[in-house]
Image (spheres, rainbow, N blue to C red):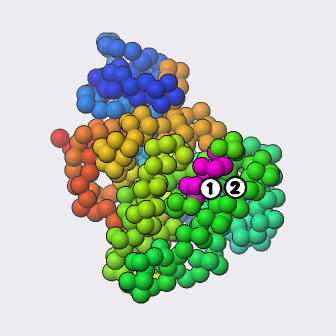
């Protein structure tokens, strides 16, 4: 089976390639990348006007299975990922039951083999049932094939416990993905603490609740030698702490979500549950700092924190509704519209933060578009303009604040292991 991608601009961040080239795929491998390939093949994809990139990787996805299949499943989440251009996604462990044993890791891997149309890498919990009291068997989890450990949805508040987890994870060569939030300081806050929370008369979440745990986890990573990845950072304070850690040469990476470089606390209205997330939408000053950190490579990765919820869970009393939004199908257009179109990032830099850097953080052989590599490829039309319609999402849920937003950048094909898994057939 041979597939030829013609007339596209190949972006390969590992070599800073940005060039009009053809790509030949045979079975599941990239076998040739050069100009003007002409030969008999089974399928030709005309990528004129498009970027041809390494398959995108999302290190922060909630697939909800097992336990919350009414929100999302491995099957529907993988279809959403493919429509969004992602060929590999990492599944967070805050399911029911939490992914806290080797047997449950095997369950996720088996379900993914049967149901998923993209690569699904399981992330294991740090503590049993994610209760923060007792560590999982990290060695067995690593052997079972977790790509990382995380308590996402909450922090490991016991510093000694996290210290021990970092030491053991370091020996197993797997990273810790840290959700940074001091639960006591965040208390019952429902949005960013500031002028908007005062105006709306609701309890806010101070930036310091994130900054304190970022600082603690950086110190513990320095002490233990662990590979630390900071999830969904959202504050100026976190950026400054990360910048300082990188200056010191620590092995620390960080991600930001598209909603945190696109929206601010001023977009919050108490009648729109899709503006409630954790961390919350922050101030304009924080957003500008996040953009600058992306531009200066202080923030390495763009991840979605795809968090599907049933419509009933995002409606009603703002204090009681669930945190989180779906993000797999809007990440690329938001990245292009908010970062590339505004000259904050070049096309190569954007794709690097969505493919090569995530692969490097995870330690997997992906995110590179070269001969001999597995054919995980994303083809994007960066100039196609359209209106986001959440009713057309492939996810089971459509809890997004970006409905009816005009954007540029559309996924045209998503190729996983040499097979076209998504095609935009609209003319």
Front residue of 103 and 180: 180
Front residue of 184 and 376: 184
Q: Is residue 25 magenta?
A: no
Quarter that holds the C terminus: top left
Residue 110 can be seen in this image: no
Contact flag, marks 2 and 1 (Cβ < 8 Å):
yes
Question: In which quadrant of the rendered view does residue 183 lie?
Answer: bottom right
Task: State the residue position of label 1.
Answer: 241
Front residue of 347 and 359: 347
What residue is drawn where x is 65% and y is 44%?
Answer: 247
What residue is drawn where x is 44% and y is 37%?
Answer: 349
Quarter that holds the N terminus: top left
Mark whose residue sits in front, 2 or 1: 1
Q: Which residues are magenta?
A: 238-246
Left or right: where 158 falls relative to 280:
right
Dominant secondary-structure state across the stretch colored magenta? helix
Residue 304 percent across, percent down from the top left: 46, 55
Q: Residue furthest left?
A: 427
In the image, residue 22 above or below residue 145: above
Callout 2: helix, strand or loop?
helix
Residue 48 percent across, percent down from the top left: 25, 28
In the image, residue 128 above or below residue 33: below
What residue is drawn where x is 62% and y is 77%?
Answer: 185
> Which mark is drawn over residue 218?
2
Q: Is residue 241 magenta?
A: yes
Binning the other alpha carbons within 10 Å of mark 1 as few (below 14), some (14 to 19) or many (20 upward) gives some
Left or right: where 246 falls relative to 278:
right
């Amino acid at each position: 089976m041979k597939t030829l991608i013609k007339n596209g601009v190949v972006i390969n961040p590992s070599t800073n390639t940005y060039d009009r080239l053809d790509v030949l795929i045979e079975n599941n491998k990239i076998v040739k990348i050069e100009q003007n390939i002409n030969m008999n093949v089974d399928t030709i994809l005309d990528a004129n006007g498009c970027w041809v990139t390494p398959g995108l990787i999302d290190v922060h996805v909630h697939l909800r299975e097992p336990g919350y299949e009414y929100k999302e499943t491995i099957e529907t989440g993988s279809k959403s990922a493919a429509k969004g251009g992602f060929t590999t996604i990492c599944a967070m462990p805050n399911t029911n039951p939490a992914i806290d044993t080797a047997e449950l890791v095997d369950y996720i891997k088996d379900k993914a083999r049967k149901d998923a149309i993209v690569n699904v890498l399981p992330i294991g919990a740090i503590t049993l049932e994610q209760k923060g009291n007792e560590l999982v068997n990290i060695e067995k989890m690593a052997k079972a094939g977790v790509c990382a450990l995380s308590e996402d949805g909450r922090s490991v508040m016991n510093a000694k416990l996290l210290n021990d987890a970092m030491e053991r994870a370091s020996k197993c060569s797997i990273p810790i993905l840290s959700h940074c939030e001091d639960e006591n300081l965040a208390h019952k806050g429902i949005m960013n603490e500031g002028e908007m929370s005062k105006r709306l008369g609701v309890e806010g979440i101070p930036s310091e609740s994130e900054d304190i745990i970022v600082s603690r986890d950086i110190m513990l990573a320095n002490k233990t030698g662990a590979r630390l990845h900071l999830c969904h950072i959202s504050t100026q304070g976190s950026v400054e702490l990360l910048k300082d850690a990188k200056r010191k040469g620590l092995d620390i990476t960080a991600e930001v979500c598209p909603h945190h470089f696109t929206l601010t606390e001023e977009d919050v209205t108490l009648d729109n549950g899709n503006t409630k997330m954790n961390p919350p939408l922050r101030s304009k000053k924080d957003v500008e700092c996040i953009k600058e950190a992306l531009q200066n490579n202080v923030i390495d990765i763009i991840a979605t924190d795809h968090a599907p919820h049933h419509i009933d869970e995002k409606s009603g009393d703002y204090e009681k509704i669930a945190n989180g939004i779906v993000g797999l199908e809007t990440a690329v257009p938001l990245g292009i519209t908010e970062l590339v179109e505004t000259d904050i990032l070049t096309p190569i830099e954007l794709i690097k933060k969505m493919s090569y850097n995530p692969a490097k953080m995870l330690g997997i052989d992906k995110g590179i578009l070269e001969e001999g590599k597995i054919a995980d490829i994303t083809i994007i039309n960066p100039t196609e303009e359209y209106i986001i319609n959440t009713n057309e999402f492939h996810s089971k849920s459509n809890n997004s604040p970006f409905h009816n937003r005009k954007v540029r950048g559309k996924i045209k094909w998503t190729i996983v292991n040499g097979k076209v898994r998504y095609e935009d057939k609209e003319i």
